[in-house]
Amino acid sequence: MSLTTLFVGLELQSPVIVASGPASHDVNQIGLAEEQRAGAVVLKTACSDKYEHMRYWPRPRYKLLDWDKQIEGRSKMFSLYSYEQGYSGTLTDYWRLIEACKQHATIPIIGSIFADDPKDWERMAINVERSGADAIELDISSPHRPGTSEFKTTFVEAIRSVVNVMKIPVLVKLAPGPELVHQCLTAEECGASAVTLCNRIRGFDVDIESQGPILHGYFAGIGGPWAKYYTFRHVAEAAQAIKIPISGTGGTMSGEDVIKYVLLGATTVQILSVILINGWESIARINKEVEEYLERKGLDSLEQIRGKALEAMTHPDEIIRWSGESKTGPRNVWKDKPEGRRTT
Ligand SMILES: Cc1cc2nc3c(=O)[nH]c(=O)nc-3n(C[C@H](O)[C@H](O)[C@H](O)COP(=O)(O)O)c2cc1C
């Protein structure tokens, strides 16, 4: 039994990857991730020089919301609300960070970039590859991105132009939303090697005493254990539409969550909040929980159950429904209706 996972041509010792963010901003953190047996690390996203202001962060930049709210004294409900934009150094610092990570780490290092002009995307991607990264993730979905969060033509051009100049695999990180399957198909058509689903959403909170916004005074990224449920749905939909692999991200707190992502079709799972809250040991704990599951189910690898839950999914028209008058049990209301399946 093994957690070894083949993802975009890289052999990972675990499907659990450290997601881009404050836990992958420094070369020393890569050693910590490696010690805990992470499969790979996606480095903090570097922004193009046009967005230099995004390299400076407000203080404080995080707030845990609803941490004290318990459901029946058991389940901890919380949201991590944060405003942290790009990697805080220059682009030259970022290329050096990649080089240093590659010198010291044995696990794959995935660079992450953000720009808007396709030429900037391309230039930055070339530097990520030259610095030795094993893959690159295009962060076209940040909740802090200036402007609207539309999947603009520039992003489609960006994916295409980066893919054209890269030898290393290109991951595209997307935002949740009604257009997601279409965006996954577009990323696939443009030659992306994988999609990362999904980035956090943009949220907002206000303080009733001061009657104004909390923290820095503007919208912020928001996520928490609850976020996995909308990402599960997106991963399930995408897995049925695309052939390229999916890296699931959002709300993972346990091995059980990783297994669910895989059952829904993901190949790897990117985690961050659980590390920020419970520490680096979370990676080893999650790995262990997945291993225990494999052992209990008599499985050799997660590959054997990838997408399995999708096979058991029902079409909405086929859902067994109870009619009010039925004395005999559930029936398929559409099929049993004389005029056949309802289409509206
Ligand atoms: C404080 C913070 C900073 C983040 N910064 C980045 C980033 O720079 N680039 C990026 O692609 N995603 C970023 N993310 C999103 C994470 O990579 C991850 O996809 C998301 O938090 C969902 O996973 P989680 O629920 O396990 O935290 C950030 C998330 C947090 C909480």
Image (cartoon, helix red, strand yellow):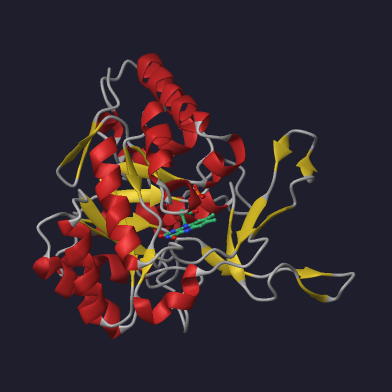
Q: Quadrant of residue 154?
A: bottom left
Answer left or right for 68 relative to 107.
Answer: right
Answer left or right for 81 relative to 5.
Answer: right
Which residue does the image show at 47% across and 83% down from the upper left? 148
Percent coordinates x, y for residue 264 in the rendering: 36, 44
Percent coordinates x, y for residue 26 in the rendering: 42, 48
Percent coordinates x, y for residue 240 in the rendering: 27, 54
Q: Is residue 12 visible?
A: yes
Which residue does the image show at 17% across and 65% down from the upper left? 126
Q: Quadrant of the C terminus?
A: bottom left
Judge whether 122 appears above or below 111 on screen: below
Percent coordinates x, y for residue 19 in the rendering: 41, 49
Q: Is residue 340 visible?
A: no
| Depth order, front residue of 40/260 | 40
Answer left or right for 22 relative to 183.
Answer: right
Which residue does the image show at 74% across and 68% down from the upper left? 214
